[in-house]
Image (tube, rainbow, N blue to C red):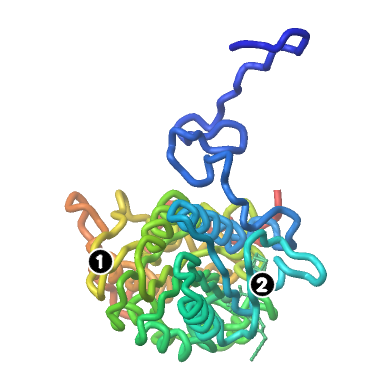
Amino acid sequence: MTTVSGARPSAPTKFYQVGSFAVGNRLLPEAGSVQSSRERANTLTSGHRACQGCGEALGARYVLDAADAAARQAGGSVVTVNATGCLEVFSSPYPESAWRLPWLHSLFGNAPAVATGVAAGLRALGREETRVVAQGGDGGTVDIGFGCLSGMFERNDDVLYVCYDNEAYMNTGVQRSGATPPAARTATTQAVGQAPGNVFGQGKDVPRIAMAHEIPYVATATVADLRDLERKVTHAMGLRGARYIHVFVPCPLGWGSKSSHTVRLARLAVESGLFPVFEAVHGEVSAVSPIRRQVPVEDYLVLQRRYAHLFKPTKDVVTISRIQALADRNIRRYGLLSHSQEVAPVLPDSATGASSTLGARADLNDAPKED
Ligand SMILES: Cc1ncc(C[n+]2csc(CCOP(=O)(O)OP(=O)(O)O)c2C)c(N)n1
Ligand code: SF4
Ligand SMILES: [Mg+2]
C-alpha cells in the first residue's frame, strides 16, 4: 500500500461480514453488483422519510439503481412513474425529493397508463433509448391500478412495472388489499370474531395473472436476496415490451415486526414456501429459486403482531395448518424443494398440530420491542 508523502498511512482495510462480499457498508466490486460500483447512481438517496427497516425503501433503491445502470450501459436513461403510496409519499414531501432521476407521480390507480403514455411519447420523439419504469404498492397494483396494468400487459407496452408488495394499504393506515394474506390482521380485518383477521380464499395472485397475459417477462423477488432482485431488473431492462416484477417487501409498521427483522422475514417467507421466487417467459415458468430446507410457516408468522391472535390466548393450530397448506401448495406448484426433501401433504381444514422449528418460541409473538 503506498502513501502520499506527509499523509497519514491509510488504515488497513477492515473486512467484516465474512462471506458477504462486503467491506464497510459497500459490496466489493469483485462481486459484480450494481451496488458495489463507485459509480452507482443512488437513484433514491438518504434523507427520505420511510420508517426504519422499510422493505419498500430498500427494494426500490436496488430496483432503480439496477434499472438506471442497465439503461446507462445501453447509452440511455430511465424515467420513473410512481403510483400513490408509501414509496411516493416518503420520497417526495414537497418541496423535497429523494429521487435523483426523472420521476413522475400522478394518481393512485393510473401509474401503468401514465407510464404507457410516457413510453409512447418517447417513441414519438425517437427517444427509445430512454426507458420507462413504473412502480407502485400492492394496493396500487393489485386493486386500484389493476385495469390499467392489465391493459398495459395486453398491449405489450414497453414498460417495466415493479410492484412492492407489503400486503396492505400501508400509507393510509394498514387497510386490507387484494394481496393481504389469509388470517392477517389489518385495520379493516380485525382480529375479532369466529374467524379473526383476513378471510381465506380471496385475494389476487398478480404474478400468475401477469403470466396469463403471456408478456415477455414476469419475475418475483424479495429484499432477502438483493443480488437476485438486481439481476432480474437488469435482465428485464434488456428486454422490450411489458415486463412485471413483484417484490416482497416486509413493512415493520404494518406487520408489527421488528425493524431489524425485515430481511429475516422476507427470507422466512421464501423458505417456508409462502412466497415462491421464480421467473416466467411468455407465460411459462422458466426458473425457480429452490428452497434447501423448508421451514414451518409458524417460524414466519410468530415474528409478526398481525398474526398475534394465532398464538394468544391459545395457539390456533387449525388456522396455522391452513396457512401451512398454502405454503406446501406453492412448493408443489413451482417445484421449489430439492428431491431430497419430501413436501408435506396438504392438510385438511380440520388438521391440527402444525410443527415448528421454533418450538416453544411462540413467546416471540409478544409485542416486538425495537432494539
Ligand atoms: C383514488 C384514491 N383512493 C384512495 C387514495 C388514498 N390512498 C393513498 S395511498 C393509499 C394506499 C396505498 O397502498 P399500497 O398501494 O399498497 O402502497 P403502500 O403504501 O402500502 O406502499 C391509499 C388508499 C388515493 N390517493 N386515491
Ligand atoms: S409504513 Fe411500511 S411501507 Fe410505509 S414507510 Fe413505513 S415501513 Fe415502509
Ligand atoms: Mg401496500
Q: Is residue 241 above or below residue 269?
A: below
Q: Please tell me which residue is depicted at 52% across the width and 40% down the height of the picture.
A: 36
Query: Where residue 11 sits in the image (x, y, percent)?
Result: 67, 17
Q: Is residue 20 above or below residue 166?
A: above
Q: Residue furthest top?
A: 5
Foreground residue, 183 or 150? 150
Instruction: Report the quarter where the N terminus lies.
Output: top right
In the image, taking residue 247 as reference, residue 304 lies left or right, namely right
**In the image, what residue type sits under mark 1?**
Tyr
Query: Where residue 332 sits in the image (x, y, percent)?
Result: 23, 67
**In the image, what residue type sits under mark 2?**
Glu
Q: Is residue 354 above or below residue 117?
A: above
Contact, CB < 8 Å: mark 1 with mark 2? Answer: no
Q: Please tell me which residue is depicted at 35% across the width and 81% down the height of the picture.
A: 156
In the image, taking residue 302 as reference, residue 207 lies left or right, namely left
Query: Where residue 304 sits in the image (x, y, percent)?
Result: 57, 64
Q: Is residue 180 visible?
A: no
Q: Which residue is mark 2?
A: 88
Q: Which residue is mark 1?
A: 334
Q: Residue furthest front?
A: 126
Location of residue 201 by image quarter: bottom left
Q: Does the residue tagged 2 have its C-beta within 8 Å of any atom of ligand 1?
A: yes
| Quadrant of the image where one finds ligand 2 | bottom right
Location of residue 345 by image quarter: bottom left
Foreground residue, 159 or 300? 159
Q: Is residue 33 visible?
A: yes
